[in-house]
Amino acid sequence: MTISQGDTLPDATLVELGADGPAPVKMSDKINGRKVVIFAVPGAYTPTCHSAHVPSFVRTKGQFDAKGVDEIICVSVNDPFVMKAWGEATGATAAGITMLADAESEFTNALGMAFDAPPAGLIARSKRYAMLVENGKVTLWQPEENSGVCEISGGESLLANM
């Protein structure tokens, strides 16, 4: 079953590359008692993700801060090394966006957002979405119908609906 607005976000362990190497990150530690934006992309460095989705949150980071958002998290079914390099390449890291790897698709599967696109070489990836989570509850849910576009899941669109 796919997550929807009003649901409690499921817990999962993701991975972040830090100074001491890969480290587990429990989603519950990120969201409990906090206001967090989470957006997911099908793959680091893929065209729409790289040129539209991540940049939309880099552009709007200050506006989310002004609305009381504690953290913006980008999730992708990639490894933490790729996510760190991609965060640096896009300016997401410099903007203060947290780049988390869902290396085992645990979070993506728990949300019901996994998909396969074999012709593009994408297997067990995440559909594109953005959400606002307040104290563990999904208060705004904006999934894309087509993972190849970034319309309702971009930073500006999420901001407009907050």
Image: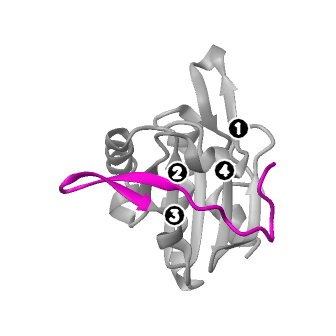
93 over 134 or under it: above or below: above
Task: Tell me: residue 33, above or below residue 14.
Answer: below
Q: Nearer the viewer, mark 2 or mark 1?
A: 2
**Does label 1 or label 4 sit earlier along the sequence?**
4
Relative to residue 152, is residue 62 drawn left or right? left
| Residue where numbered disc 3 is placed | 27
- Between the residue at mark 2 and the residue at mark 1, the CA separation in whole angstroms equals 14 Å
Find residue 33 and report its horizontal and vertical position in percent: 55, 84
The quadrant holding residue 122 is: top right
Instruction: Confirm or deny contact between disc 3 and disc 2 (CB under 8 A).
Output: no
**Of circles 2 and 4, which is in front?**
4
Which badge, 2 or 4, is on the more N-terminal residue?
A: 2
Does the CB distance between marks 4 and 3 fall below 8 Å?
no
Question: How packed is label 2: few (under 14 Cα within 10 Å), some, or many (20 or more)?
Answer: many
Single out the mark in the foreground, 3 or 2: 3
Residue at (58, 62) in percent of width and height? 11
According to the picture, the residue beneath numbered tag 4 turns out to be 110
Q: Position of residue 13 (x, y in %)?
A: 48, 55
Q: Nearer the viewer, mark 1 or mark 4?
A: 4
Task: Indicate the quadrant where residue 86 lies.
Answer: top left
Residue under the image location 79 percent in, 50 percent down: 2
The kind of residue tagged 4 is Ala
Total residue callouts: 4
Residue stretch rendered in magenta on the structure:
1-25
Instruction: Name the secondary structure under disc 4.
Output: helix
